[in-house]
Amino acid sequence: MTGAGNMMDAVEARDMGGPDMEAFKAAMSDMPAAVTVVTCLDLGEQPIGTTLSAVSSLSLAPPMMLACFDVGSNTLKALLPGVDFLIHVLAEGQEQIAYRMAGKGAQKFDALDWALGPRDLPQIAGCAAVIHCSVGQRVPGGDHVIVTGNVRRVTRSDAVPLVYHRRALFPIPMQSQEAAP
Ligand SMILES: Cc1cc2nc3c(=O)[nH]c(=O)nc-3n(C[C@H](O)[C@H](O)[C@H](O)COP(=O)(O)O)c2cc1C
């Protein structure tokens, strides 16, 4: 079979049924991502939050972030335009926090080391970075909603960040300044 024939097969396969979903999911798991926990207050002013890896910087001027939420997320319900929220970049040793906050229900905050942060937002201790944002837009994207965040304040520590890669959590292998090109 020629190269053109192969390409035609791929086009026809896509037109008939879309991409191979297992291959798509595996390719997405190949992409390392920071592990974050987004927190805010729900409509009753109670702490709410979830683990997210689909979080990214969006703009420098003005400073903006984006976060992608499944439409079924309870945290998403509270993130209406103008609402303040925190993006916590989790650090080495916070793997259990990532799994706990990926559950459902208010008990997620039990046994979690958190305190009231800016605007009385629930802030988790010991993270690599905490980015305080307020919701800009909510943009539909398939079965997810992209929430943009206008960055208000950033705090950082020297803690080693966690990454999510191939469905497992790892501390980022750190390079010394001297080893960097
Ligand atoms: C490492 C990790 C990364 C995750 N990333 C996302 C994500 O980017 N977007 C999302 O909607 N859910 C993500 N989840 C799943 C949510 O944490 C999970 O659906 C959670 O129960 C939602 O909670 P909520 O309904 O209280 O908001 C992730 C889970 C884990 C463990």
Image (tube, helix red, strand yellow):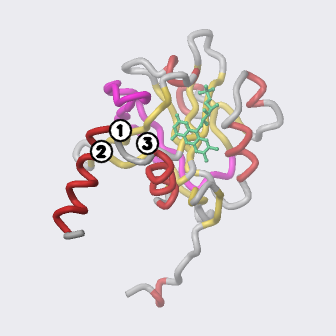
Q: Indicate whether 78 appears above or below 148.
A: above
Label 2, label 3: how many angstroms apart (C-alpha)? 44 Å
Image side of residue 56 versus residue 167, left or right: left
Residue at left offset 58%, top offset 68%: 172
Q: Residue furthest left?
A: 4
Residue at left offset 56%, top offset 60%: 165
Considering the image in quadrants, where does the N terminus appear? bottom left
Evaluate if marks 1 and 2 touch, with contact meaning CB atoms under 8 Å apart: yes
Q: Nearer the viewer, mark 3 or mark 1?
A: 1
Q: Which residue is mark 3?
A: 153
Q: Is 130 in the magenta?
A: yes
Looking at this view, is 2 or 34 the one in front?
Answer: 2
Specify the segment rendered in magenta.
Answer: 125-154
Mark 2, Cα crowd under 10 Å, few <14 / some 14-19 / many 20+, is: few
Q: Which residue is mark 2?
A: 14
State which tag comes first along the sequence, 3 or 1.
1
